[in-house]
Amino acid sequence: MKRKIIVGLLLFVTMIIIGGFVIWHNPSLKKELLRLYLGSMIVNGINNDAKPAAAKLGMDIYAINQYPKITIEIKLQSYDGNDGVSKTQLKHQSCEFIDVFQTMREREKSIIYGLLSEDKVLFQFSVFNSFNQKIQSASQVLAECPNFP
C-alpha cells in the first residue's frame, strides 16, 4: 500500500515537472502570458498610481484592459465646459507611458517593445466633463510614438 502511494506521488511530481518545463519553454504560451501581464500591468499602473495624482488635479481616471486596446476614461470633476484637453495633449500623455519600461534590462525591454509593436497596443482616451458629457477623445498606438525605440 505504501509503495503504491509513493509511486503515485513520484509520478505526480514527475508530471508536474515535465508539464512546467513544457509550459515555460513554449514560445507562444510565453508570449500569451506576457500579453496578459502587460495589459494588467498597464491598467493597474494607471488605476493605482495615476489615480491619486489625477485626484489632486480635479480629475477621476479609470483604465480598462481590453488588450491590445487600453481604454482610459477621464472625468474632469469641476469642469462644465465643452472644450477640454486637446487631442495632442492626450496623445503626448500616452507616449510618455513608454518611459516606464526604461528601467528594465535590455533583453526585457526588447521583448516588451517587440510585443507592443507586434500587437499595435492602442491607448483610447475619452474625456468627460462634470455632467458626464464626452468632450474629447483620442487614440494613440504606442509603437507610433516619437519616443518609441
Image (cartoon, rainbow, N blue to C red):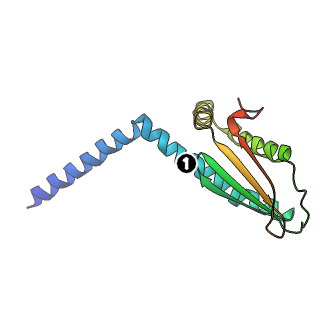
| Quarter of the view holding residue 43 | bottom right
| Quarter of the view holding residue 95 | top right
| Quarter of the view holding residue 126 | bottom right
Residue found at the very far left of the displayed protein: 1
In this picture, is 52 found above or below 121?
Answer: below
Element class at badge 1: helix
Residue 101 locus on image (x, y percent): 68, 39
Quarter of the image with the N terminus is bottom left
Residue 116 locus on image (x, y percent): 62, 37
Amino acid, disc 1: Tyr
- Residue receiving disc 1: 37
- Residue 100 is left or right of residue 118, and the answer is right
Residue 81 locus on image (x, y percent): 91, 63
In this picture, is 85 found above or below 76?
Answer: above
**Nearer to me, 70 or 133:** 133
Quarter of the image with the C terminus is top right
In this picture, is 148 found above or below 83?
Answer: above
